[in-house]
Amino acid sequence: MTQLKDLVIQAHGGLDRWLQFNQLSADLVQGGALWTLKGHPDTLSRATVAVGLKEEWASHAPFGAGDRRSRFTSDRVAIEDRDGALLEELVQPRASFAGHTLQTPWTELQLAYFAGCAMWTYLNMPFLLAWPGVESEELEPWPTDSGDWRRLAVRFPAGIASHSTVQTLYFDADGLLKRHDYDVEISGNTPGAHLIEDYTEVSGIKFPTKRRIYARQPDSSFSTDPLVVSIDLSNIRLS
């Protein structure tokens, strides 16, 4: 029997096609309550985001004022000027979030880490299911008004920086990713329900362009108020 992870990878364009590319970039518009809560209401409201597809890295530009850009990897985050000169860096950045809650403000380097970690995960999904060390297990279906969504519990290895070690993916009848649940470990294990819509196709790969993230309840339900994060993507490019 074909595993669910193989079905959904094929539904999004197939692994062979995905592996032809090394980088994805897109124009990004973000909103929601999180950015103000963390002390950075406008730094990443509009930017170009780029992520690696074969290695874990991400960059946002501009990163706030002054033509700066961020550089994220799993064990280092930095802010550079427009010419690539280093302005600030933080090694082993995840350790800097020890003791944080949802209300704890972030430094600019911590913001760059969160944004890089998040967008790398989002833009590589569901193809991350094929990465070495990533494990998945099908769960019971989730009922919705449009029919049952199949679900995968995903476990990431220690070498991948993501929101949480265990995350849950929801797929519709066509195999497209519709929801992504996780606990944001670096923000006090805050539980999120991430809704995914408005797919477009680029070079034969299907990408959602609208993402809305809400607070998840213990029974996996959520309310749309407040809107924690909104993400809108356009001009998606693969290279």
Image (cartoon, helix red, strand yellow):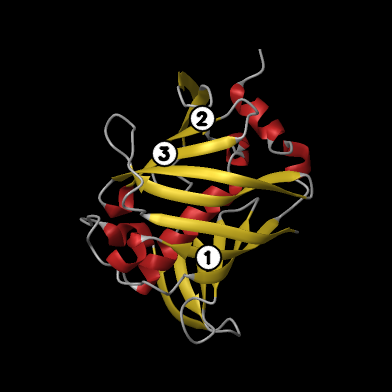
Q: Which residue is mark 1?
A: 29
Q: Amino acid at mark 1?
A: Val
Q: Badges 2 and 1: C-beta atoms under 8 Å apart? A: no
Mark 3 Cα-neighbour bin, 10 Å: few <14, some 14–19, many ≥20: many
Disc on the earlier residue, 3 or 2: 2
Mark 1 Cα-neighbour bin, 10 Å: few <14, some 14–19, many ≥20: some
Q: Which residue is mark 2?
A: 135
Q: CA distance from mark 3 to mark 2?
A: 16 Å
Q: CA distance from mark 2 to mark 1?
A: 31 Å
From the top left corner, tell me how far across and down residue 105 is, in percent.
26, 67
Residue visible at 29% across and 54% down in the picture: 187
Residue visible at 59% across and 59% down in the picture: 233
Along the horizontal axis of the image, is 14 left or right of 138?
right
Looking at the image, which is closer to me, 6 or 36? 36
Q: Which residue is mark 3?
A: 181
From the top left corner, tell me how far across and down residue 43 is, in percent.
43, 74
Looking at the image, which is closer to me, 207 or 50? 207
Q: How many marks?
A: 3
From the top left corner, tell me how far across and down residue 130 is, in percent.
62, 35
- Secondary structure, mark 1, is strand
Q: Badges 3 and 2: C-beta atoms under 8 Å apart? A: no
Disc on the earlier residue, 1 or 3: 1
Of circles 1 and 3, which is in front?
A: 1
- Secondary structure, mark 3, is strand
Residue visible at 55% across and 30% down in the picture: 171
Q: Amino acid at mark 2?
A: Glu
Q: CA distance from mark 1 to mark 3?
A: 21 Å
- Secondary structure, mark 2, is strand
* Placement of 39 over or under 67, stated as above or below: above
